[in-house]
Amino acid sequence: NLQQAISRTHNPLRPVVLTIGKISGGRAPNVISDQVKMWGTVRSLHPDTHKVLPAWIENIVANICGSYGAKYELNYRQGVPSVQNDPALTQLVESVSLEAWGSDRVCILPEPSLGAEDFSMYLKKVPGMMFRLGVGHKDKPNYPLHHPQFEVDESAIVTCVVTLAYAAYKYWHNRYLGH
């Protein structure tokens, strides 16, 4: 099993998440299928870990198939890298958020997220940072981001605009006025 193999062969301090999210095969419930297709996703925080995953997965799949006399075809499409926030900009946004909103409205995440986000491609070109904005309702049920009933409390937009404007002002002020 690929997930067990990850836990036994990869550095536990460099997390890797492998999910097989779709499996399809066969035409009837009482006939053994001659082919099965699987689709999945892989996520890691470290670029060097991400680079070795295709060969590692192929090795595991080849060994499993070889032990059963089966053939395989692996189509690995490299996804987006993990988001790597610029430390100085992260500190700036953290500081202005705490100053503008207070510690009761700002939550500093203690660990990075393994979520996939194409914003990481921008960060390969220019320094930047990504933060999360709480957009849940106080007076009705809230659903996760990809849920069909997800709904944004639009009053949170003000919080975002003020935070970004204040961060831009502080960045400009620090850079050009030297304070």
Image (tube, rainbow, N blue to C red):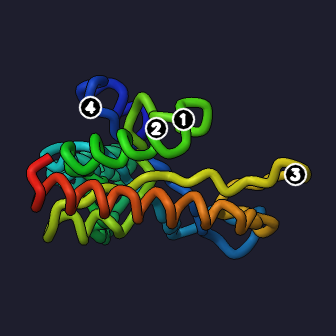
Residue labelled with disc 4: 14
Q: Is there a contact, CB below 8 Å, between mark 2 and mark 1? A: yes
The Cα atoms of the two marked residues, 1 and 3, are separated by 25 Å
Left or right of 101? Residue 124 is left
Above or below: residue 23 compared with residue 111: below
The mark that comes first in sequence, 4 or 1, is: 4
Q: Rate crowding at label 3 as few (under 14), some (14 to 19) or many (20 or more) other CA atoms within 10 Å.
A: few
Point 77% across, 69% down: residue: 148
Residue labelled with disc 3: 141
What amino acid does circle 3 point to?
A: Pro
Q: Rate crowding at label 1 as few (under 14), some (14 to 19) or many (20 or more) other CA atoms within 10 Å.
A: few
Q: Quadrant of residue 120?
A: bottom left
Q: Is there a contact, CB below 8 Å, between mark 2 and mark 3? A: no
Q: Rate crowding at label 4 as few (under 14), some (14 to 19) or many (20 or more) other CA atoms within 10 Å.
A: few
What amino acid does circle 2 point to?
A: Leu
Tell me if residue 62 can be seen: no
Above or below: residue 1 compared with residue 21: above
